[in-house]
Image (tube, rainbow, N blue to C red):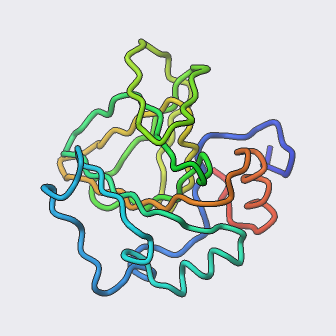
Amino acid sequence: MPLTKNSDAYKNCYNLKLPELDYIIRSDFKLPSLKDTTNGIYRTDPRNVFKLDFLQSLNNFKIYPMVAVLFYTKPNHIGSPHIDGNAPNTGPWSINWNIGSEMVLNYFKSDLRNHSKDYLLVKDNLEKDEIFHPVSPFLLKNDVVHSVDNVDDSPRWAITIRGYPKIDWIELIDMLLEEKLIIEN
């Protein structure tokens, strides 16, 4: 059944009809040195990563980037279940581009939510609920328990945008469906 506005079939992750990274990244952008990251995580202003015209084009879709977060993981890395932290004015979502290793995104059955700005590692033994093999770019729900696994011998960087609107996940998906930005999985 195709996903439609107000559907009962909402998922935690969707491929998006947005440009590939090569077309939207600043020509002077360089990935950070690992010594400049905190446990492989690097936060910066999205204008330091993306071309201004791309960021402005997202505004046409009612998406307002507020922070870019870059993640590094080693080859064949099996991620720990966690819930992302979000700045107070950002929504529970991120738009992601994957560089390097192919990845698998796992979501787990849990009622845990994280509404703080800090990451929450989840030590519970949880059952996988949804497995997603994203194609860049993709949208992910980040206020629920998930993990990311690299599935080959290459390191991986993820470049993400987080921002406004700070709305419910279902409202965001409905809005992106109206804008025809979601690719059916």
User: Which quadrant of the figure has residue 92?
Assistant: top right
Quadrant holding the N terminus: top right
Q: Residue furthest top?
A: 125
Residue at image coords 57%, 20%: 109
Q: How far from the left and from the top, in percent, is residue 83? A: 47, 34
Residue at image coords 60%, 51%: 14
Judge left or right: residue 53 versus residue 26.
Answer: right
Residue at image coords 57%, 48%: 88
Residue at image coords 68%, 58%: 165
From the viewer's side, name the closer residue of 124 and 2: 124
Q: Residue furthest right?
A: 6
User: Which quadrant of the figure has residue 80?
Assistant: top left
User: Which quadrant of the figure has residue 151?
Assistant: top left
Q: How far from the left and from the top, in percent, is residue 29? A: 29, 79
Task: Please say if 147 is above or below 87.
Answer: above
From the viewer's side, name the closer residue of 185 and 46: 46
